[in-house]
Amino acid sequence: MPNLIANLLPHLTAYRIPGVAGSGDSIHPGYGGQSISNLPATICEMLDCPLPGGEPLSEKWREVIGGPYRQVILLLVDGLGLQFFENFIHESPWSSWMEEGNLLPLTSIVPSTTSAALTSLWTGKTPVEHGILGYELWLKEFGMVGNMIFQSPAAFLGEIGALRRAGFQPETFLPVDTLGPHFHRAGRDVIAFQHNSIAKSGLSQMLLKDVDVWGFRTVNDLWVSMQAWLADHQHTPGYVYAYWGDIDELSHRYGPNDERVFLEFASFSSLLNRFLLHLRARGRGDSLFLMTADHGQIGTPRQEKYELRNHPELLDALIMQPTGENRLPYLAIHPGREEMVQNYLLQVLPGEFQMVCSTDLVNAGLFGNQPACRQAGQRLGDWVLIPQDGAYLWWADRDNPLLGRHGGMSSGEMLVPLFALRY
């Protein structure tokens, strides 16, 4: 395999959006053809059903992937950062697959978080276009802050989907089209394999219109079910999507460098290896397997200085609790208190956060391509805090349980792998 990481990574690390700072380790999103938001248009192109208005990957990436193809499989491994994955590429079974496939780097989107990234992967749009700009968002139309994964009021625990009681309709919430109807009109089969716990979730309903959703219970169930589907549809052009989220969950709980996370991905890789051997044995050379991630993670040990309840002066200056991500908070500040907040951060948390006007970041393109959707400005608040290094802000009125996080712009969060294997 050519050293594609070494060849292409400098394009990602050198790119800078004008007016957007960050720590020395920061990566800016490559929406112009080097981001996961460019994958949908590329996949549609490979399946000979171009996505209207979609921007595919840059030529340097597309020429490696090739095409066209009869079928494309995309495996989305939640939380699989490039730096984490590189620990495995010289070990079995990945070392043998690296001889046959290609490994390329991509950037995530900003914020580097699941709700925003999955929406980009099912629309081909950037966050500022589709409006899913974080884990928790101020939804002015419903008068509350909503959790965009669980689709419940952010302060509620254990009430998944409760936003429906306020009139929230996941099927019609997005201001942009999703991929399912596009594939359907083009005569392409499209199926999504998701764990039973999320197969019928509000987020799935929001993203998977006109998609055949197959719930699985275990990883073995996933691979056997995918093999069965592919055997039954071996002559049909189509798109197969599979989502696996276990290492993200473990990384949040124990930190991304914990032994549990490494062992879990090693076990997953062993089972995936059997599936890839099956693909290669039955393949005709006209289909493509892709594996990528929505984001990576970084370790965030608990530190009291990052808990908002320990900063009452800062909290008093805010109209409401922050929204967005712990690693990319959005602030609504009382008029006239902006300078006070800026000075407080400089004096009490020096070098930890860069405070930037959200409108400036939208105009610079940090959140994606213009035109922005109508609701983007409200959901971003007036100011954005860009954490430096491992800083974060925890504002929930409960204990902080997370030892790993994402949402920010560090290389650990922003760089993800794209593994491509023709079969």
Image: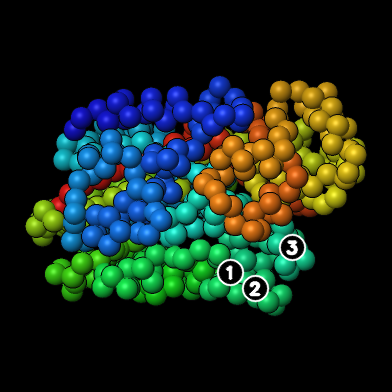
Q: Position of residue 220 (x, y in %)?
A: 30, 62
Tell me if mark 1 has few (under 14), some (14-19) or many (20+) residues whose alpha carbon lies within 10 angstroms of its own. Answer: few
Numbered mark located on residue 173 in the image:
1
Give the amino acid type for the residue marked by disc 2 in the picture: Phe
Q: Is residue 341 left or right of residue 394?
A: right
N-terminal label among 2 and 1: 2
Q: Which residue is found at the position 70% from the left and 30% from the top? A: 354
Q: Marks 1 and 3, Cα distance to the nearest angstrom?
A: 13 Å
Q: Position of residue 385 (x, y in %)?
A: 70, 37
Q: Which residue is found at the position 28% from the left and 39% from the top? A: 59
Q: Quadrant of residue 70?
A: bottom left
Can I make out residue 245 in this image? no
Element type where label 1 sits in the image: loop
N-terminal label among 2 and 3: 3
| Residue linked to disc 3 | 140
Q: Is residue 421 left or right of residue 283?
A: right
Can I make out residue 100 in this image? yes
**Which quarter of the figure is the N terminus placed in?**
top left
Numbered mark located on residue 168 in the image:
2
**Residue toward you, 257 or 142:** 142
Tell me if mark 3 has few (under 14), some (14-19) or many (20+) residues whose alpha carbon lies within 10 angstroms of its own. Answer: few
